[in-house]
Image (cartoon, helix red, strand yellow):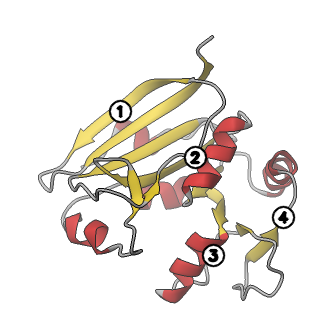
Amino acid sequence: MTSALDSVATMGTIFGGMAVSLDGYIRSEGGDLSWLNDAMAKNEDYGFEATERRTGAYVMGANTYREMAAMGGRGSAVPTYVLSHDETLATGRKTHLYSGDLRDLVARIKSAIPEEKDICVFGGGQLITEFIELGLLDELGVAVVPVILGGGVPFFGRISEWKKLALRECRSFPSGIVLLDYQLTGPTG
């Protein structure tokens, strides 16, 4: 299924997203992610290819990077910036460790990637929260997975003020997964 939004990428957009259980967790208490893999159907397009086409650089947290590396995903053709204070973290060819101010990182990435490409914040509830807090995130994608975990790592950390979002798109799949795409419009007050 192709969406009108798949072909629309605003220049310099910073977008992020994550899969989340119906009760708001991105990881079970025991760290098991099988609930996510079990929910996905092979014949459903969740937008992975569209994300790859529009992305000029990825920003991810160290835990997400370690998880991907453990599954064999240590190298990408797209520059990846991993937020970590661990300078010994093994990285791939186009992977860069970063531990400074996120605003500086965004400026650095925007000057290094083609204008028509966007920045994808990939993984880490705390990382998404930090980007929202700093007003750096333009779009937020949420894949609601039809499972209730009952506890674990929450999608969002503490946010200092309400954030208003405008729904851009909602797609549901036979698997029960629902993709929500929001534009962040700013504080409510």
Observer-nearest residue: 153 or 141? Answer: 153
Mark 1 highlights which residue?
169
Residue neighbourhood size for the residue with mark 1, other residues' Cα within 10 Å, grouped as few (<14), some (14–19), many (≥20): some
Left or right of 63, for residue 165: left
Q: Position of residue 101 (x, y in %)?
A: 86, 51
Mark 2 or 3 closer to N-term? 3
**Local secondary structure at mark 3:** loop
Residue neighbourhood size for the residue with mark 3, other residues' Cα within 10 Å, grouped as few (<14), some (14–19), many (≥20): few
Q: CA distance from mark 2 to mark 3?
A: 30 Å
One can see residue 92 in this view? yes
Mark 1 or 4 closer to N-term? 4
Residue at 32% across, 44% down = 179
Mark 4 highlights which residue?
99
- Amino acid type for the residue under numbered disc 1: Glu
Mark 2 highlights which residue?
157
Left or right of 181, for residue 44: left
Locate residue 129: give its quadrant. top right
**Local secondary structure at mark 1:** strand
